[in-house]
Amino acid sequence: MTGAGIITRVIGFVYRIFLAGALGETNLGIYQLIFPVYSICFTLYASGIQTAISQMISHEPKNRHPGILKSGLCLSLFTAILLSVLLFHFADWIGVSFLGTKETASLLRILSFLFPFCGVTSVINGYFYGISDASIPAVSQIIEQLFRVGFVVGVSLLFLSGTLTSGVAVLGLIAGELASHIYNLLRVLPHIPLGVMKKSRMQIRRLLTLSLPLSGNKLVIAVLGSIESVLIPAMLYRYGYSTEDSLAIFGILTGIVLPFILFPGTLTNSLSVLLLPAISRAAGNDQYHAVRRTTDTALRYSILLGVITSSLFLNYGREIGLFIFQSENSGKLLTALSFLCPFLYVSTTLTSVINGLGKTGITFLHMVIGLCLRILFLIFVTPAYGIYGYLFGMTISQILTCLLNGIYLVRKNGIQFQLMNHFVWPMIFSSCILYLSKLAGSILERHVSHPLAGFLFIFPAAFLIFLYLWRFRLIILSDFRKK
């Protein structure tokens, strides 16, 4: 799963660079606007059902697996098809009244054909998670990304002379999901042939009992996140931007800048996947010293990753935006969000630790508080201060969520934070070193006149930062040895 996460993030990152150039900033914003609807629908037809399938499969004897799988497929397909029909029929109303952009209606109609395939894929993935075989879902993710990117890039280069339409980008979602769907079916049939699947009303009732609370919590998060996304271009319009500029900034932020900032978070996401069962086992055996030791190590590296990426984006954000995305606006937003990184990555780790302790309600409450705060900033601050008012609210929200999670762990489990040694001094040192490397790079660039010259001194700066972290035992090589 870790390898698949890294591979899919890399493919997705390169794909977004292509989308940004081929679609243009405004069309990218229109394309990004359909994902709030997708998120809500996915939560209803797949998210909770997948988790429930995984739990039931892991606890039930093998002879009941076919009935559980068929019941899950029936429930997910019924919900997905119903949502597909409703979305196709009400696409115009949703596009105008909810998303505020009529151009999204045609994209929503295309998107509606995705749901049944995505539902089946999710249920099958839940089955493989339940039998502790994560390789199939991992390969499925990679196949989905490759076919999606291959379809869109192929159509763009072969038929559209390197340009792209938002409709083709949405068709790419269907192409990728269809390929993943076929792969999953081929892999599940040797385990459970279709002929032996027997639908069970009792299994469907159990699935509903398990999935509804899971879907309910996730639905609250999805709805709040969707409201936030839809409000961004609307509040930017109230600030004074034109409709096109509002969509362009929204597209840059959600389609380029945030995925770029989240890209290093692949490491903390992978760490969190490993943390949750380790923390859960240790807590279950009352080994709270092991919980504290594991948490301290994970937090230290999450903070350091955030410090390094924050220092990099703070000093090189504009240059990265211009060089990679050919967009000055993306560089400005990347610089403005640089302080988000430490709190974002640490919050991911803290959330995983708290979930591993079985306190999922705590993390849910903290996430809701953070989302509500961001929405309040959108409504009351963004119309007065523009996109930077929203970015400030996003940073404050992430800091608050991080603090709430941290305070909970300090009070309940005695987790200790060494902020000066792990955060403040490394942040000062890495920011100063990268600032000096940027100055040296700008001097060299004036003499060499090559775009890469400005980035040349990043490598010796990175070496000096590593030496600092190693010298003060913030990076300990024995932490990476298998124990």
Image (spheres, grey):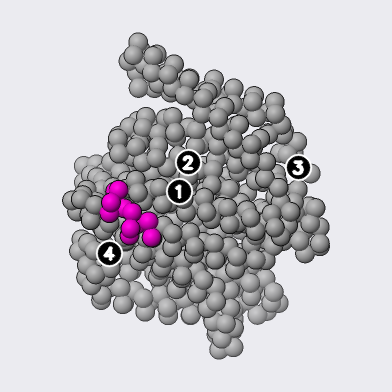
Q: Earlier in the sequence, mark 4 or mark 2?
A: 4
Front-lying residue, 199 or 337: 337
Residue 467, which numbered label? none
Can residue 172 be seen at all in this image of the molecule? Answer: no
Does 377 appear in magenta?
A: yes
Q: Earlier in the sequence, mark 2 or mark 3?
A: 2
- Judged from the image, the secondary structure of the residue bearing numbered disc 2 is loop
Q: Residue furthest top?
A: 447
Q: Where 433 sits versus 337, above or below? A: above
Can residue 258 be seen at all in this image of the molecule? Answer: yes
Q: Residues within 10 Å of mark 4 (few under 14, many from 20)?
A: many
Q: Where 468 sits versus 84, above or below? A: above
- Judged from the image, the secondary structure of the residue bearing numbered disc 4 is loop
- The image quadrant of residue 41 is bottom left
* Residue at image coords 45%, 39%: 338
The residue carrying mark 3 is 482
Viewed as shown, does residue 186 lie left or right of 467? left
